[in-house]
């Protein structure tokens, strides 16, 4: 239209239409620019949404990796703690095992030392006590055999009494050695029980009644009327009382007295045997329970007593007690020992 009016030389309309062309062209440019901007915004939004999704995906992956890392760290920490705990348990077990092994070795060593000491003591006993008894027995039998044709009745009786006495000593020594060895080698032989020591003392007196009557010895019993209860191994204490009774009979002259007594204090019971025999000197008392000094004790009667006393001392101590000796030379002896009243 602008060109048409220009040909018509209607320049005013031509200018108006040209202005409209410019206006429409600017409007169209703006519309196109707006559309381009809208397309760019839409594309930008799409890109933004895509980037956001990728970012969210990356964040989710990072979160999952963090969870995996945390889980792996916790698992690693648990494994490390478990390894440390297991190591500590193994170390404690090894230390305890080593200590137990050390204690067992020390116990075995102590037992071996005790057995070695016992072997030496037993050898000493066999070398002196039994050897002396066997030698005496041999000499008596040899003398009897060589002098039978020339012996009168009284000499024959004396020989037989000496032979019987020596045989009795040998029997007592052999019995003590057997019992001593048995208690030393059998760790299961100790079985304490509650029993009446008064009954055991009466049984001991009855057991030695023939020997007491043979020497015209009087026996006395000073114990509570209702009994004297102790918690020990009855068999062992019976051996102790037998030895003390036998020793008292050997060391007491004819017409003498032997007394059994007891008492209690602070949960302990004291049992004892008192005689009016030959007694012992201070020097003999100091060596009475030392088996290695078997030749040091004075007097034949004392030597006969010592093995039984050594055995008695060990049996009393095995039962948790202690043994004591009081004696005056020429007056008599009192041997007593303590025992637990209850277990």
Image: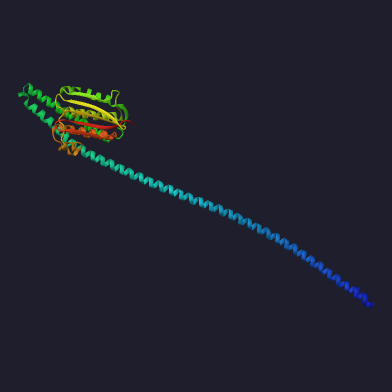
Please name the residue shown 88% across and 73% down the image: 19
Q: Residue reaching furthest bottom?
A: 9
User: Coloring scheme of the render?
Assistant: rainbow
Determine whether, in the image, residue 29 is placed left or right of residue 310. right
Decide: is 28 above or below 131: below
Q: Position of residue 145 (x, y in %)?
A: 8, 26
Determine whether, in the image, residue 105 is placed left or right of residue 160. right
Q: In terms of image quadrants, where is residue 260?
A: top left
Q: Position of residue 120 (x, y in %)?
A: 21, 39
Q: In terms of image quadrants, where is residue 234?
A: top left
Decide: is 254 above or below 71: above
Judge by depth and name the residue closer to the eye, 11 or 96.
96
Residue 287 is at least partly visible in this image: no
Judge by depth and name the residue closer to the eye, 328 or 58.
328
Q: In terms of image quadrants, where is residue 325?
A: top left
Q: Position of residue 339 (x, y in %)?
A: 28, 32
Please name the residue shown 7% across and 27% down the image: 146
Judge by depth and name the residue closer to the eye, 118 or 200.
200
């Amino acid at each position: 239209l602008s060109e048409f009016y220009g040909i018509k030389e209607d320049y005013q309309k031509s200018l108006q239409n040209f202005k409209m062309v410019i206006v429409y062209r600017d409007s169209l440019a703006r519309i196109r620019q707006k559309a381009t901007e809208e397309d760019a915004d839409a594309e930008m939004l799409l890109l933004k949404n895509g980037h956001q999704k990728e970012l969210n995906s990356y964040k989710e992956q990072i979160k999952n990796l963090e969870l995996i890392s945390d889980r792996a760290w916790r698992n690693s920490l648990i494994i490390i703690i478990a390894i440390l705990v297991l190591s500590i348990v193994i170390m404690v077990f090894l230390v305890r095992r080593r200590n137990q092994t050390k204690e067992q070795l020390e116990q075995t060593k102590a037992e071996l030392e005790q057995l070695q000491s016992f072997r030496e003591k037993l050898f000493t006993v066999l070398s002196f006590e039994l050897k002396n008894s066997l030698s005496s027995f041999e000499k008596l039998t040899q003398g009897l055999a060589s002098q039978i044709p020339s012996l009168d009745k009284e000499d024959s009786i004396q020989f037989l009494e000496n032979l019987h006495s020596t045989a009795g000593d040998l029997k007592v020594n052999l019995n003590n050695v057997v019992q001593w060895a048995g208690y030393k080698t059998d760790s299961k032989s100790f079985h304490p029980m509650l029993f009446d020591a008064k009954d055991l003392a009466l049984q001991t007196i009855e057991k030695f009644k023939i020997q007491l009557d043979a020497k015209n010895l009087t026996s006395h019993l000073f114990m509570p009327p209702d009994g004297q209860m102790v918690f020990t191994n009855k068999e062992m204490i019976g051996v102790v009382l037998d030895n003390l009774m036998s020793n008292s009979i050997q060391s007491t002259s004819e017409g003498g007295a032997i007394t059994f007594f007891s008492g209690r204090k602070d949960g302990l019971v004291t049992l004892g045997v008192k005689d009016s025999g030959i007694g012992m000197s201070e020097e003999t008392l100091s060596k009475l329970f030392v088996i290695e000094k078997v030749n040091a004790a004075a007097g034949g009667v004392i030597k006969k007593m010592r093995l039984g006393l050594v055995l008695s001392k060990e049996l009393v101590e095995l039962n948790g007690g202690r043994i004591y000796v009081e004696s005056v030379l020429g007056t008599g002896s009192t041997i007593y020992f303590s025992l637990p009243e209850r277990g």
